[in-house]
Image: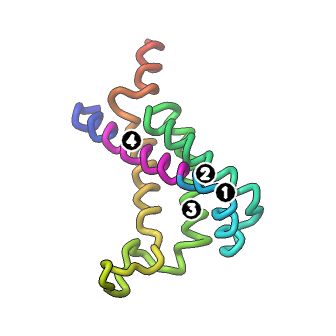
């Protein structure tokens, strides 16, 4: 792997890991009841259980991606959460994640987000699975210990 690819993987890993952690923390810090209501409204199966599982998958999975630990394994449930979100919530809103529907005195008014960001997360996770987590990762450290 070229040095530039290792740096690219590091940058991608930090951004994606932080993004998942931020989304998981947002669901947990506000309490899972609001997230559960969203899941019920969108028809996600087992909303009570899912409202607990998804935030932890995002928070802990995001942290694992952030530090580059078990990248290939951890990416799978994160991709699954993105696919479920696309199918159950965002697909009906189309591709674009930013839909300006009006302008108020306070600024722009946005409509519901599409699945664009979910696809970007999926693509980034697949890239990390294929190219590895890059520099300064737990996976790289463990591989060097095995040699």
Report the mark closest to the observer, 4 or 1. Answer: 1
Residue 51 spot, x, y in % from top left? 68, 57
Between marks 1 and 3, how big is the CA–CA gap?
20 Å
**Residue corresponding to mark 4:** 13
The tag earlier along the polypeptide, 4 or 2, is 4
Q: Is residue 128 above or below residue 27?
A: above
Q: Residue at x 41, y 55 (%)?
A: 123
* Nearer the observer, 11 or 133: 11
> What separation in Å lies between label 3 and label 2 (alpha carbons)?
21 Å
The answer to whether the residue labelled 3 contacts the one labelled 4, judged by CB atoms less than 8 Å apart, is no
Q: Earlier in the sequence, mark 3 or mark 2?
A: 2
Question: Which residue corresponds to the image point at 53% horizontal and 73% vertical from the top-left?
Answer: 90
Relative image position of residue 78 (x, y in whole percent): 55, 50
Secondary structure under badge 4? helix
Task: Please name the residue that numbered disc 2 is placed on.
Answer: 28
Mark whose residue sits in front, 1 or 3: 1
Q: Which of the pair 79/96 is nearer the observer? A: 96
Foreground: 33 or 89? 33
For label 1, the residue is 32
Check whether the beta carbons of the residues at disc 1 and disc 2 lie within 8 A of each other: yes
Q: Position of residue 134 (x, y in %)?
A: 35, 33
As displayed, is residue 75 above or below residue 103?
above
Separation (CA) of disc 3 from disc 4? 19 Å
Please name the predominant secondary structure of the magenta segment in the image: helix
Q: Dot 4 surroundings within 10 Å: few (below 14), some, or many (20 or more)?
A: many
The residue sitting at 43% across, 38% down in the picture is: 66
Element on which disc 2 rests: helix
**Chain part drawn in magenta:** 10-25
Check the image and report above or below for 40 versus 65.
Answer: below
Q: Is residue 72 magenta?
A: no
| Disc 3: which residue | 83
Q: Secondary structure at mark 1?
A: helix
């Amino acid at each position: 792997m070229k040095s530039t690819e290792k740096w690219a993987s590091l940058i991608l890993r930090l951004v994606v890991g932080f993004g998942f952690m931020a989304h998981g923390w947002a669901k947990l810090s506000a309490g899972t009841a609001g997230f559960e209501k969203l899941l019920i409204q969108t028809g996600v199966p087992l909303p009570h259980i899912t409202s607990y599982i998804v935030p932890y998958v995002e928070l802990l999975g995001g942290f694992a991606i952030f530090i580059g630990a078990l990248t290939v394994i951890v990416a799978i449930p994160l991709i699954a959460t993105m696919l479920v979100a696309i199918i159950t919530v965002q697909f009906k809103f189309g591709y674009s994640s930013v839909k300006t529907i009006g302008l108020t005195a306070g600024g722009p008014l946005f409509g519901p987000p599409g699945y664009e960001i979910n696809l970007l997360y999926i693509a980034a996770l697949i890239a990390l699975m294929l190219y590895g987590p890059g520099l300064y990762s737990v996976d790289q450290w463990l591989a060097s210990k095995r040699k």
